[in-house]
Amino acid sequence: MSELVLSAVDQGVLTLTFNRPETLNAWTDAMGRRYFDLLEEAERDPAVRAVVVTGAGKGFCSGADFKTLSAIQTGAYDEKPDPRPNTFPTSIAKPVIAAVNGACAGLGMVHALVCDLVFTAEDAKWTTAFPRRGLVAEYGLSWVLPRIMGQQRAMDVLLSGRVFTGREAYELGLVNRAVPGDGVVAAAQEYARDLAAHSSPASMSVIKRQVWRDWDVSLEESAKTATKEMLASFGRPDFAEGVASFLERRPPNFPSL
């Protein structure tokens, strides 16, 4: 199972690579379980401060594996599902960055967009694909997409199921950055290393929780929670180190999460 997702740590950044290149990294329950297990391990590992997720070969994730879909269609699928939802990366206390290197379709698009930031290759092919397979917007994508790119643009990519490039994904506001050629993983890793070197792990954890949680609350409730979180941050060693490193004009040495 460990071969399904490759794992490597460098300078505080864990890179996880979906490793089913012969299927453009089509999603299986086994691959998903291994991915989520590695995210849980990353959350506990003090050496990891940020995570980059990408795919081996020419694809990021081409969607659900067709053997799985066929088994579901015929009623032959009997594998016990993972209790962790597909939105599980949003609950990890460390930033998770998708580096979409190629085909990103259906369920693969879900897994890119439940990361905290998304980098894409300019020529990567994106598609929701759902209506062209007789399916619906899966796993909260109808909730995520309008919030990221606006309702009309979300309707376009969901209703049409059309293929669009990483460059258009950037123009639509769907991703943070579109990178020429095959440099997307390096660009995502460089960004993640900057987070690991200069951003407080405790601060990133709280900010991530605030951003994902605050989509469901009023401005007043968000402001009240932010005040409580800010008061708590004053008592952490991260605050003292952040101020000291600024005054001393040196890189910060924040404690691990």
Image (tube, helix red, strand yellow):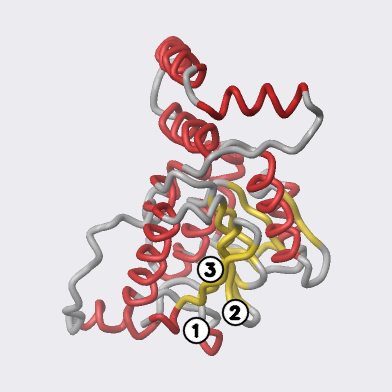
Residue 29 horizontal side relative to residue 6, left or right: left
Residue 19 % position (x, y): 51, 81
- Mark 2 touching mark 1, by CB under 8 A? yes
Say which residue label 2 marks.
Answer: 56
Q: Which residue appears at 33% of the width and 69% of the height? A: 33
Mark 3: give few (<14), some (14-19) or many (20+) Cα within 10 Å. many
Q: Which residue appears at 44% of the width and 10% of the height? A: 220
Say which residue label 1 marks.
Answer: 20
Q: Is residue 248 above or below residue 63?
A: above
Q: Which residue appears at 61% of the width and 40% of the height? A: 149
Residue 210 % position (x, y): 46, 29
Q: Secondary structure at mark 3?
A: strand
Residue 190 % position (x, y): 74, 56
Q: Which mark is residue 109?
A: none
Question: What distance separates the C-alpha of mark 3 from that of mark 2?
Answer: 10 Å
- The image quarter containing residue 79 is bottom left
Residue 72 horizontal side relative to residue 54, left or right: left
Residue 86 % position (x, y): 36, 57
Of 81 and 17, which appears nearest the observer? 17
Say which residue label 3 marks.
Answer: 16
Circle 1: residue type: Arg
Question: What distance separates the C-alpha of mark 2 from that of mark 1?
Answer: 7 Å
- First reached walking from the N terminus: tag 2 or tag 1: 1
Q: Is residue 219 visible?
A: no
Q: Mark 1 or mark 3, which is nearer to you?
A: 3
